[in-house]
Structures are given as C-alpha cells and as structure tokens.
Amino acid sequence: MHSAVVIGAGVVGSTIAATLAARGHAVTVLDAGEPGSAVSEASFAWVNAHHGKRPVSYRELNRRGLRVHHRWHREGRAPWFFPTGALTVAGDRGGGEKLRAELESAAETGEQLTELSGAQLRRRFPDLGPDVDHASFNPDEGWVDTRRLIAHQLAAASGAEVRTSCPVTRVLPRPGGDGVEVHTADGGVHEFDSVVVAAGNGSAPLLHSLAPTPLLTTGSADAKIGMTLETEPLDVAPPTVFKSPDVSIRPAPGGRAVIADHATAANFRHDDPDLWTLPRTLLARAATIMPALASARIARVRVSERVMPVDGLPVVGRVAPGVLTVLTHSGVTLAPLLSELVADGLDADTPPGLVDYRPDRF
C-alpha cells in the first residue's frame, strides 16, 4: 500500500488526507499544533468564485471548486458546507460600477446572478439597513464551518494516523527517488512513499531547500494580515453571506455572525497596537449593512497572516522527487477540488488540470 504523509491539518491538508485515504493510501497527518489552529481558524470561509478573481483561468478554477462543494453536499459528504447564497452590496467607493461589471460578466458566462433593487432587497432580506439599495445575489455561493470541516475530514480519513503538536523540521527525498524522509522536532525520522506539504505559511521553511525561489509572501514586506471576529449569539442572525466594499458578514453556528474585511486588516502589522481598534470598526461597518449588529457583542477575534503565494495564485505540484506542495489563497473554496486533483496525480509532476499553477513557474 502506498504510504503518504500530509503535513498540515488545516482545511486544505485535512481534505487532502481524507481523499487520499478514500483512494486506498496509507495516510499519516502531521501538524505543528492542533488541527485548524492557524490560518483555517481565522478564515472568513466564504465559498465563492467572485468576479474580482483574476485571471479568468483562476476564477474558473474557483468555479470548479464551488461545483465540487455542491457535489459533495448532494452526496452527503459535506455537512460543513452551507449553500446560503451570497449578497454583494454595491455601497459607495465605486461599488456600483464593480457590481455592474460582475452582472455583465455573469450574463456572458451563464452564472445565476440576480440584480436586486432596494425594494426587492427589503422584501427578500428585511433586516438589511436602509442604505442598502443595490446588490446582486448569487445562489450558488455559501460558507463553511471550518472547525466542523476539519474534524469531519480527519474522521473520514479512515485508518489515518493523525499526530498533532508534531512540528516537521525537514523533508528529505531519499537518493534514487526511493521515498522521502520526514524529520520531526522530537528527533523522529519517518519514511513515506510520498509527502504532501500543505501547511500554509508553515510550509515556507520546509520548502526552502527544495524550492530555493520563495513561493509565499510570509515573512516578507508583502505579507498580509487577516482578521475575523465572531459575535455572541444574536437575536437576528444573518441569513446569508453579505459582501460590501468595506465589510463582509456571514452566518456562523449557534446563531452568531462572523465579520471581516481583509483589505482593511492588511494595512496593519501583527505588532501594531492599532490593529486592536479594528474589531469595533468592523462591527460598526457591519451594522450599516445589518442594523441588528449594532448591539452585538464580540465573542472572539482571530488574527493570522494570510497564506499568499508570491503572485497570488495557487502553487500545486512537485518540488522534489516524492514531494508535492499545495499552497493557495482561497483554500476553503478550492480544498475539495484540489484534494481530488492531488489524489488523481499524486505521482505526477503536476496534478491534472493544474499546469498553470506548477511551482517551477517562478
């Protein structure tokens, strides 16, 4: 039986592990901390193929990812996916022009995007604020409960060994392509037929000796912070994903809401004390979209450095004999699709359909 280790137990790593196990591989999962405790926990977790994703081939990849979410959901394999649809609010700051461009693009590609005026919005979403008067609704999009996804995928990886708090220090292909050694911080040396490095920003030090050209922005001046805040249970919870030019809102388990704006958070560094003024700012912005949030209490705030390849596009493919890496922004949208493609092409230099995203493009 082919042995494979997946380094990283976030959304991407856990989903790859489950799919490999379902294909009959002997799977081990190694994570430096607890599953999902890094970037996955701080993700806004919106499953989408938004008009702003460029180039067109990358947007189409996200559309394929969206379709896999729906297929798994129909098959009963995705209890963590909530296909509520998503409402994109025009707002100001050029939002109306962007909305029109998205509607035109959707008409060309056959996407089910509906333009809604103020009166239509009020009938469909009566809890929206009075200033929300122009939006589009995409019924195919939705959101993911990342904690539930990770727990479900690791449980679904039947027979897999999952080792947490087990940092990997080195990945070393054996001479002649005869497997790969994985060295762990406890002094262990483990041998596998294949390694999939899917540890988000934690992948960078492991890949340094295998891919000398940096693949991620982590540790550089281009690194971007992401922040999400989660409310206490609400009297009126958001019914769908709301996306405006300066804030995003989605439902969360237990009648809560998750609120984010990555563009604003990206202006801060981890050590900037002003970063912690942002939660109240985001909550105030969210209340202009959904006034019921004006009295919401913040239960928790999560901050992480976003996983961002240097050109913003996924990096998927072989970096050394027996070593495949999967690094991507939009991991929540793409994880199910990428897991299937990786399982289809575990022994290939580049999994099928991902030639534009191979590591050697840099």
Image (cartoon, rainbow, N blue to C red):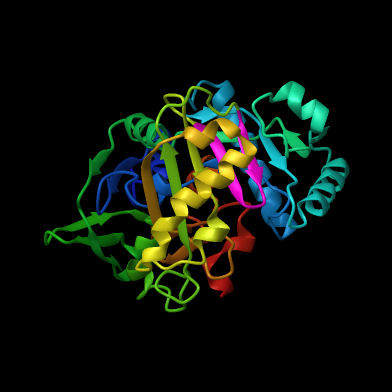
Q: Quadrant of the C terminus?
A: bottom right
Task: Judge by depth and name the residue closer to the eye, 224 or 36.
Answer: 224
As drawn, 298 above or below 198: above
Q: Left or right: where does residue 28 sit relative to residue 65?
A: left
Q: Is residue 144 visible?
A: no
* Image-quadrant location for residue 1: top left
Taking the view exactly as shown, the residue that stands out farthest to the left is: 187
Task: Judge by depth and name the residue closer to the eye, 255 or 129.
Answer: 129
As drawn, 63 above or below 170: above
Q: Is residue 155 visible?
A: yes
Stretch of the chain drawn in magenta: 240-251
* Image-quadrant location for residue 15: top left
Q: Is residue 241 magenta?
A: yes
Residue at the spot 88% in from the left edge and 45% down from the top edge: 108
Q: Left or right: where does residue 292 sit relative to residue 182?
A: right
Q: Residue 186 in the image: x percent, y percent?
A: 12, 59
Q: Magenta residues: mostly which secondary structure?
A: strand
Q: Residue 264 in the image: x percent, y percent?
A: 55, 59
Q: How many marks?
A: 0
Task: Judge by depth and name the residue closer to the eye, 58 or 265.
Answer: 265
As drawn, 34 above or below 209: above
Q: Residue 259 in the image: x percent, y percent?
A: 51, 43
Q: Left or right: where does residue 341 sit relative to residue 234?
A: right
As drawn, 34 above or below 313: above
Q: Residue 291 in the image: x percent, y percent?
A: 59, 33
Residue at the spot 70% in from the left edge and 59% down from the top edge: 54
Q: Is residue 229 magenta?
A: no
